Image (cartoon, rainbow, N blue to C red):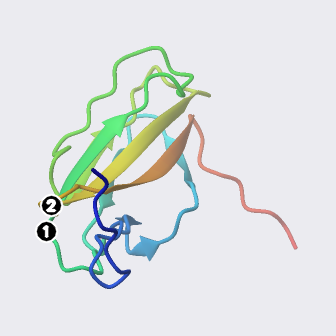
């Protein structure tokens, strides 16, 4: 037996994941130095329905080019961090942020991606 569809106002809506205050669906790209510590904040993430949110930041092992291990500290908290491995020179590390609501009928999740381009040198500034 088919259920009755809820109106837009009654239905659950996806949360919106924020990275460091930016509410967007775009991929965040960062150039980072070997051995540098980075933090990612999901504090500005929102749920228009007022549901509670849970957070998870993880390494996407399939998309990255660095074959070594990378650890995300505080992966289930609002702010997570990692240190770019010293062996990751000229490699990419992909971090996926997951924000899930706690709606009782069906939990919905939004995803954001952070691509870290690891370099041994500071980015050069362009001359005018």
| Vertical relation: 12 (above or below) 124 | below
For the residues labelled 2 and 1, the Cα–Cα distance comes to: 5 Å
Q: Locate the C terminus by quadrant.
A: bottom right
Query: Does 127 sit left or right of 65 as displayed?
Result: right
Residue at the far right in the pictured view: 128
Query: Does 110 sit left or right of 10 as displayed?
Result: right
Place of residue 91 in the rendered image (x, y in percent of width and height, measured from the top left) = 58, 27
The 10 Å Cα crowd at callout 2, few under 14, some 14 to 19, many 20 or more, is some
User: Picture quarter containing residue 53?
Assistant: bottom left
Residue ID at (39%, 35%): 84
Residue ID at (65%, 51%): 123
Residue underneath mark 2: 102
Place of residue 43 in the rendered image (x, y in percent of width and height, measured from the top left) = 24, 71
User: Picture quarter containing residue 63?
Assistant: top right
Place of residue 111 in the rendered image (x, y in percent of width and height, measured from the top left) = 41, 52
Q: What element carries label 1?
A: loop
Badge number at residue 52 = 1
The 10 Å Cα crowd at callout 1, few under 14, some 14 to 19, many 20 or more, is few
User: Picture quarter containing residue 20?
Assistant: bottom left
The reply to whether the C-beta atoms of the residues labelled 2 and 1 are less than 8 Å apart is: yes
Q: Is mark 2 on a helix, strand or loop?
A: loop
Q: How many labels does the image show?
A: 2
The residue lying toward the viewer, choosing from 34 and 54, is 54
Query: Does 33 sit left or right of 81 as displayed?
Result: right
């Amino acid at each position: 037996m088919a259920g009755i569809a809820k109106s837009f106002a009654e239905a659950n809506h996806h949360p919106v994941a924020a990275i460091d205050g930016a509410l967007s669906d775009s991929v965040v790209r960062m150039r980072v130095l070997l051995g540098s510590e980075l933090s990612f904040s999901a504090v500005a993430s929102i749920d228009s329905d007022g549901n509670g949110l849970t957070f998870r930041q993880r390494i996407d092992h399939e998309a990255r080019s660095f074959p070594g291990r990378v650890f995300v500290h505080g992966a289930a908290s609002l702010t997570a961090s990692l240190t770019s491995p010293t062996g990751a020179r000229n490699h990419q590390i992909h971090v996926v942020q997951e924000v899930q609501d706690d709606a009782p009928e069906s939990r919905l999740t939004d995803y954001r991606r952070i691509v870290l381009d690891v370099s041994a040198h500071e980015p050069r500034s362009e001359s005018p």
